[in-house]
Amino acid sequence: MARRIGVFICHCGINIAGVIDVEKVAEEMRKYPGVAFATTYQYMCSDPGQNLIREKIEEENLDAVVVAACSPSMHEETFRSVCKDYFSIYRCEMANIREQSSWVHDPEEATEKAIKLLKATVEKVRENEDFNPIMVPVERKCLVIGGGIAGIQAALDIADAGYKVILVEKEPSIGGRMAQLSETFPTLDCSQCILTPKMVMVSRHPNIKLLSYSEVIEISGFVGNFNVKILKNPRYVDEDKCTVCGDCEKVCPVIVPNEFEMKRAPRKAIFIPFPQAVPSTYTLDREACLGLAPLTCAECRDACEADAINYDMQAKVIEEKVGAIIVATGYDLYDKNKLVEYGYGDDDDIITSLEFERMLSASGPTGGKIIKPSTGEEPKKVVFIQCAGSRDVQHMPYCSSICCMYTAKHALLYKHNVHDGEAYIFYIDIRATGKGYEEFIARVMEEERINYIRGKVAKIFREGDKIVVYGIDTLTGKRVEIKADLVVLAMAIVGKKGTKDIAKLLKVAVDDGIFLKEAHPKLKPVEALSRGIYFAGCAQSPKDIPAVVAQASASASKVLSIISKDKLEKDPLIAVVDEEHCSGCGVCISVCPYEAMQRQPNGKAKCIEALCEGCGTCAASCPSGNIEMRNYKDEQIEKMIEVII
């Protein structure tokens, strides 16, 4: 079809024009058939650049536009918004001459490639068809997976806006890792003092349905219409009847390690995770209890005057329909047993940062007293080792973000508890970028007289009643050998165990650290590639509490922009099946990552428009070539290739 196509080439400062001869590209495009106008501008995405496009559409009577600039993932929507007042947005295409040309080639090759890319894009837009958006209904409800501070904040923000929230937490209580902290940097607020009110708000909010001790087992559907199945595990304790009197716990004969206390303290088989737990109720550990399968003990049931214990309680599956999903699954510590060079597991007096955190807590296993686990004595010399597993190509190559700050906090609190003690911190670099963080580090170094040693520990070994820490001070070039009573490892942060399973259900990617991969690290930091799915907190990357809370609120705002609408517009550039010639082989059904290709009663495939994300996997795999992508027809692709080669 004959179209008057305008070509607009962006300099992008020197990102493009510093390598590509943009004027030569414009001159070549003016000669190309179908191109009615071609020009360049320094920043095409700026207001003047966008106004230039508007002016030329009117002056030159253009009915299609090609913008040669950066990645379409950054500015395609920008330029389509400019064009929508004049013609269909599908008559606006972008040629990526920055990432695909100027950034990867020398000037001559980059210029030639830019011309070819533009010609191919002109051929594509020439054959593009106009489509109307697909309208899909919206379920005005959100699912939040994870009940740490990220999930709590996101749930409260959405619920306060007047919308329903399903908050699912795998553990018996919400609170997450923050509930395990004694105090928080840099203000040294009591963690529970600032967290508990929010936990209680969640439990009492009329718009929040809290499903603790539960897990998501199935997710299907699409943005606005996700179908979710949640497995609610049996507590064997009726939450409504339990008065938290503790009589059941007192008589329970079974003692097992307490996970909340990092297994540094015991608990009974029937337990409450911590005093401020929400929901405030006991949970019976099926694996440890003697009263289940078969019944050999009924001490707790006999002691319960409220008749809250029910050994016959069964797991049940709850089905919910939601419009959007927030994943806030939190973090774990890197497997300490992999740090064999630091001797963890072989020595009781080498502990992790979270174990030390619980030791500092007044409600922890030692009641806030700092001790050597091996003897119970007060340690007079403690060595803190940062980057234990972080910034190490043999383990986790990334920075875990919060270790510098919480190690400084640990050293400060140690000195406040043991006035005549000595604290040493081995570090690679100090990274303190938050508000008040640098001042906190300065306070620890100068006022508290904590000994900072720049260098990595090479070896740790036991020598009598001391732990010898051996390393190099890279500032002085001297060897350092410290005989310590206690060693604390600032372990690398990794994604929570089970995040991979959730990612698989949601069809989103994870990286090597088991963190969820966002759609774009700068422009879409809380969004998955699949619309309607958002991330919050350490499920996406290591971060401190203020950043977690901010990201949770950001995800909540994204969710509200979806569930506040009656209907959503969906991109119509999806797969189309030629049903007349479909053989019903089912290949497209088996490869579709979004389950959009489904078999009809007649055996032939059909694309469910609302589910299709336009990835093209089905079209590429169809053995008979009976599936086409809208505006990516075979003839278009062939013409684009022909122009390029």
Image: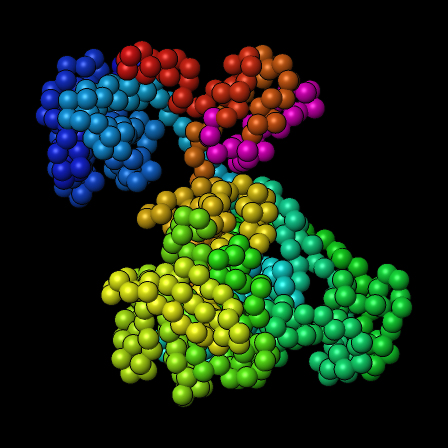
Q: In which quarter of the image is the N terminus?
A: top left
x and y percent of residue 625 in the render?
Answer: 52, 14
In the foreground, 40 or 456: 456
x and y percent of residue 243 in the render?
Answer: 72, 81
Q: Looking at the picture, does residue 242 appear above or below residue 559? A: below
User: Residue placed at 59% from the left, 69% from the top?
Assistant: 262
User: Residue placed at 58% from the left, 12% from the top?
Assistant: 581
Q: Indicate the quadrant where residue 88 lies.
A: top left
User: Residue placed at 30% from the left, 40% from the top?
Assistant: 74
Specify start and end residues of the magenta stretch as a single range. 593-616
In the foreground, 185 or 60: 185
Q: Looking at the picture, does residue 363 appear above or below residue 588? A: below
Secondary structure mostly taken by the magenta-highlighted segment of the chain: loop
In the foreground, 472 or 211: 472
Q: Looking at the picture, does residue 75 appear above or below residue 474? A: above
Side of 376 relative to 390 (left or right): right
Q: Indicate the quadrant where residue 209 lies.
A: bottom right
Q: In which quarter of the image is the C terminus?
A: top left
Q: Is residue 549 magenta-colored?
A: no
Q: Is residue 603 magenta-colored?
A: yes
x and y percent of residue 346 in the render?
Answer: 58, 64
- Res 546 visible: no
User: Residue placed at 59% from the left, 80% from the top?
Assistant: 375
x and y percent of residue 291 in the render?
Answer: 85, 68
In the foreground, 165 or 161: 165
